[in-house]
Image (cartoon, rainbow, N blue to C red):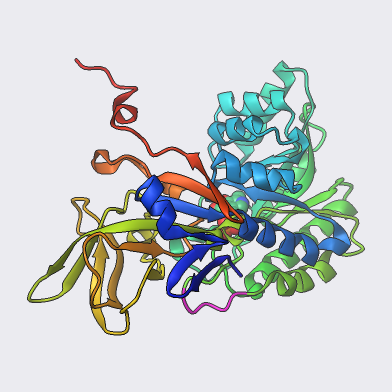
Amino acid sequence: MHDFKLKNNKLFCENVPVEKIAGEVGTPAYVYSERTLLDHFNKLKKAFAKIQPLICYSMKANSNLSICRVLAKAGAGIDIVSGGELYRARKIGVNSKKIVYASVGKTLEEIEAAVRFGILFFNVESIPEMQAINTVARRLKKKQLIAIRINPNVEARTHKYITTAKSENKFGIDIQTAKKMILSYSGEFENIEICAIHVHIGSQIEQVGPFIEALKKSVRLIEELRSKGARITHLNIGGGLGIIYNKERPQTADEYARAVMPLIEKKNLKLILEPGRFIVGNAGILLAKITYIKDTPVKRFIIIDAAMNDLLRPTLYGAYHEIIPVSCAKCEKKKKADVVGPVCESGDFLAKGRSLPLLLKSGDILAIMSAGAYGFSMSSNYNSRRRAAEILVNGDKYRIIRKRESYSDLVKNEMTA
Ligand SMILES: Cc1ncc(COP(=O)(O)O)c(C=O)c1O
C-alpha cells in the first residue's frame, strides 16, 4: 500500500531512514516515495487496462514539478484548475492533448493560455464560461473541444467541504440545463465543439455507490443526447477515490474498475479519470521536530515545528493523520496529547487527544502520515512561516525537490513604503 515501513523501530521511506533526511534537510519536511506514487498510478492503469482510459493526475493534490513529472513519464495526463497549474504542466512537458481543465471561474487570460497551448478539453461549468471560450477561440482562429461538467445531485457521503455534486454546490451544470445547452448550442458556437461529459462528485469517497449513481446518470444523459444527434465521444468521471488515513476501508482500484467498466463498455466512449489523492495521498509524510512538551493541569501539548500552515487538513476538515515517532526505543507507555504547531490560532493542531509515547522529548522527530495529498499544495506562509522543504525518495537515494523557503523568499515581492 505504501513504502513507509518501521524496521527495528525506525521509520524508513523505501530504503532510506527518514531520521537521516530530517537530520540532513531539517524540518518541517515533506518526504515522498516515488515507488508508492508509481505503484498507485499503475494500480489504476492495470485495473482499467481493458478499456485504456486517459488517466489525468489531478495536480491540485500535489503540484510539485518532480511529482508530476514522475507521473507524466509513466504516461499520465494532467487535470488542471488554473493558469498556474497550466504553467506547471507546460514546465514538465506534458503533451497538451493529455490536459483537461476544470474550474468554475476560468478567467479570459487563463482560457486564452489554454486554448493557445491546445489542451484536450475544458470542463465547462456554466453557459457564460462556454460563451467566453468560444469568443477566445474565435479570436485565436481555433476550434476548441469542450466537455460539459454536469452536477448530478449525488450525495458523495464525504466531508461537506469536499462534496461537489449536490445541487447546492457551485460546481457543474444540472442535468436538465446541460441537456438543453448541449442540444441547443451545438453548432451555434462555431469555435467550440461539445464532445464530452464530465462529472466529479467529491473527494475521499470510500464507497463505490455514489460513483455509480453519478455514472449511470451521465451515461443515460449521453444516450439521450446521442439519440438527438449530439456527438459525444468522451466521458470524464473525475477523481475522488478515498484512501486509508485511519480505519477507512475504501474501495480498491480493482473494485472501482469492476463497478465502472460494465457501465461504459460497448458504449463507444473514451474514458477519462482524474485521480489525485489516490495516487499521492499515502505516498507522502510530513516530518516535524518536537520543540517542547508542555504538560498543563488539563492536558499534554506536544508542540512541533510544523503547523496548520504546513498541513491544513486537520484544521480545515477535522481530518485524521496518524502520527508516529520516526525512531522509538521505549515507546510502550503512552499518554494522550494534542499535537500542535506554533501558529497563533487555537485551531492550529495536527492531532487532538492522541495516544503517543510518554517518553517523547524535545528534539524527537515525528512523522505525520498520509500527508502527500492536499498537504504541501494547501500550505501557506501564515504567521510568516517559511514553507517546508519537499524530498523525493527513490530506493536508497533521496533528492530535494523543493528547497525550504528562506526569509528573503517571504518578502521578495513586497516593497517597503
Ligand atoms: C474536477 C476535479 N477532478 C479531480 C479531483 C481530484 O480529486 P481526488 O484527489 O479526490 O482524486 C478534484 C478534486 O477536488 C476535482 O475538483
Q: Is residue 329 left or right of residue 190?
A: left
Main SS of the magenta segment?
loop
x 57%, y 23%: residue: 109
Quarter of the figure that contains the C terminus: top left
Which residue is painted at 78% across and 31% down in the image? 188
Q: Residue furthest left?
A: 297
Q: Is residue 125 magenta?
A: no
Residue 209 can be seen, yes or no: yes
How far from the left and from the top, in percent, is residue 240? 60, 61
Q: Residue at x 42, y 44 (%)?
A: 389
Q: Position of residue 403 (x, y in %)?
A: 43, 37
Closer to us: 39 or 145: 39
Ligand 1: quadrant of the figure: bottom right
Residue situated in front as seen by the camera: 416 or 404: 404
Residue 327's quadrant in the figure?
Answer: bottom left
Is the residue 157 above or below the residue 195 in the image? Answer: below
The quadrant in which the N terminus is found is: bottom right
Residue 51 place in picture, x, y as percent = 86, 60
Where does the image place residue 172, in percent across and percent down from the top left?
A: 60, 50
Task: Identify which residue is drawn at 35% across, 63% down.
Answer: 366
Side of 364 where 24 appears, left or right: right
Position of residue 390 relative to residue 190, above or below, is: below
Q: Within the image, what quadrant is residue 90 found in?
A: top right
Compared across the picture, whether 398 is left or right of 139 comes to left
| Magenta-colored stretch includes residue 248 | yes
For the magenta stretch, what is the residue range? 246-250
Q: Quadrant of residue 367?
A: bottom left
Given residues 221 and 358, the one toward you in this image is 358
